[in-house]
Amino acid sequence: MTEIRADIEAEAERLLALAESESVPLRLLGGLAIRLRAAGGLPPAFVRTYADLDFVTAKRGSGKTQSFFREAGYEPQKAFNALNGSERLLFFDDSNDRQVDVFVGQFSMSHTIPVNDRLELEPLTLPLAELLLTKLQIAELNEKDVRDALALFHLHDVGETDGRTINARRIAELCAADWGLWRTITGNLETTRTHVDRYELSDEEQATVRSRIDELLALIEAEPKTRGWKLRGKIGERKRWYETPEEVGGGP
């Protein structure tokens, strides 16, 4: 295998190419994945730096993924991986002071987003719907998550298919089955909408982003809710509806 690249984007591409050649089911997520999906590059308003690499692998891919990263030059966090390897893996690149976080079969932080059955839809990253969900499922948004979410809305239409479109139907279905996820996602969409004018976008671009957020919110609200959603909704915010990063091993 080739050596680890100092440039994080080049390293992500190296790992994805190696994973494909080794038949390792590995997909990129996080801000770097959003950048990779931006045809022609990100607009200047949404450009930022990236410290670490975040991936997801298949539910039954933990063992193969651990071997893959060791061979790719990474040092495993042995104690963490031994305890959490069925759900999450950590690796380190000491020379570049970089961490690699690999979720297994699902993305779990404040909420759990199932991704195992969606890995084959895209060759390099999670689908756009899941990229957005992983950004907006955080109970307390930070600036980079707002920036990345707005970048997705700026770059991609909202619709009911995957590919170059944010699949609103997928998001609506997940939210309709989980009151807690619905509460966090809809609240964060509304919060994100209020931050649009903080970024250097034209009036037309701002209107487009807000329109896409509104379209997604409308589709989420229109989706018929499950019995479990309705029962949990009766409890509402009297009971905490999300996990904290410490309880799930820390964030990527």
Image (cartoon, grey):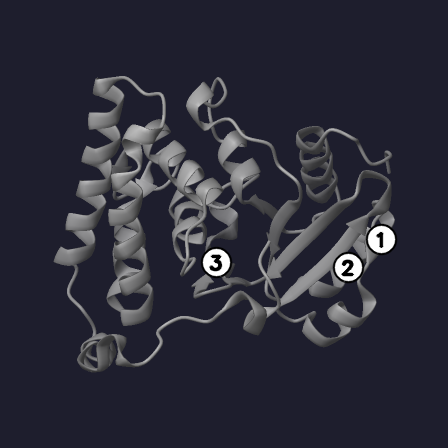
Left or right of residue 207: residue 67: right
* Residue at the disc numbered 1: 70
Q: What residue is rendered at 28% in x and 63% in y?
A: 182
- Labels 1 and 3 touching (C-beta < 8 A): no
Could you tell me if residue 178 is visible in this image?
Answer: no
Q: Residues within 10 Å of mark 2 (few under 14, many from 20)?
A: many
Secondary element type, mark 3: loop
Q: Nearer the viewer, residue 54 or 45?
A: 45
- Asked where in the image residue 29 lies, by quadrant, the reply is top right
User: Could you tell me the amino acid type at mark 1?
Assistant: Arg
Q: Say the numbered circle drawn on residue 66.
A: 2
Quadrant assignment for the N terminus: top right
- Labels 2 and 1 touching (C-beta < 8 A): yes
Left or right of residue 146: residue 54: right
Reading the chain from its start, which is encountered first: label 2 or label 3?
2
Q: What residue is rendered at 62% in x and 48% in y?
A: 54
Could you tell me if residue 115 is visible in this image?
Answer: yes
* Residue at the disc numbered 3: 115
Q: Position of residue 153 (x, y in %)?
A: 33, 34
Q: Is residue 71 above or below residue 38?
A: below
Q: Nearer the viewer, residue 245 or 65?
A: 245
- Asked where in the image residue 11 lies, by quadrant, the reply is top right
Real-space CA distance between mark 1 and mark 3, rounded to the nearest whole angstrom = 24 Å
